[in-house]
Amino acid sequence: MKNRSSKTILVFFALGLISCALCVQQAQAVPLPITGAITFAGGVTLNSGSVNTASQVLTWLDESGDMPTVQSASGSFAGLDGATATFAFPWSFNSGPIAAFWTVGGFTFNLIASTIISQMGDGFLAVSGTGTISGNGYATTTGVTWNFTVQDDASNGVFSFSGGSEAIPDGGPTVALLGLALAGIESIRRKLRRATS
């Protein structure tokens, strides 16, 4: 009886290993998520003469008529430093979805929602949002943050701004699968120990 039980456990263990191998093969075919951070700087025209009362960006052009550029880039965005970005406008700070909110170097950020997080009347405005990034053969990555800051002292009606997105893919499914695998191994170990006792 013990011999048959051990064989059954070994068969299930072998099937589990084969299943894991097949899952790993499929996982390798899935594109990698986008990682890293990217920051932009440039000029914007707001719908108000002060950031204290502004509610939207009318254009993303500086005093020379140039679009914003990438100031720093890491991870999947590496190598984009200095690249010109295209931004959608007009953009209301408290807004819903905007497809292709920014694009640069083959990457596209789709804004899901944004909201003002600081506009205290002290000449500083901060907006935060979330969205997805896709492009360049990577998997579409969700849960990406967008941060935008602008301050008073406009020159010829153009305010300087800085902004950026950070892509941190969710590792939850990977951790869950690892936990299930470890629980399965412990269960088999206990059954084998009982079978030999």
Image (cartoon, helix red, strand yellow):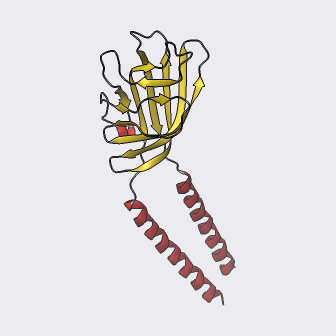
> Residue 36: percent from the left, percent from the top?
42, 38
Residue sitting nearer the eye, 57 or 136:
57
Residue sitting nearer the eye, 84 or 1:
84
Is residue 76 visible from the viewing direction of this image? no
Location of residue 125 with respect to 78 vertically, above or below: above
Location of residue 183 with respect to 35 vertically, above or below: below
Residue shown at 56% from the left, 52% from the top: 172
> Residue 152: percent from the left, percent from the top?
49, 12
Is residue 80 visible from the viewing direction of this image? yes
Asked whether, in this view, residue 29 is left or right of residue 197, the answer is: left
Count of numbered marks = 0
Q: Quadrant of residue 67?
A: top left
Asked whether, in this view, residue 72 is left or right of residue 168, the answer is: left
Q: Quadrant of residue 75?
A: top left
Asked whether, in this view, residue 139 is left or right of residue 53, the answer is: left
Quick one: quadrant of the C terminus? bottom right
Quick one: quadrant of the N terminus? bottom right
Residue sitting nearer the eye, 20 or 120:
120
Residue shown at 52% from the left, 16% from the top: 51
Q: Residue furthest bottom?
A: 1
> Residue 126: percent from the left, percent from the top?
54, 23
Location of residue 116 with respect to 25 vertically, above or below: above
Residue sitting nearer the eye, 80 or 27:
80
> Residue 84: percent from the left, percent from the top?
30, 29
Residue shown at 52% from the left, 48% from the top: 170
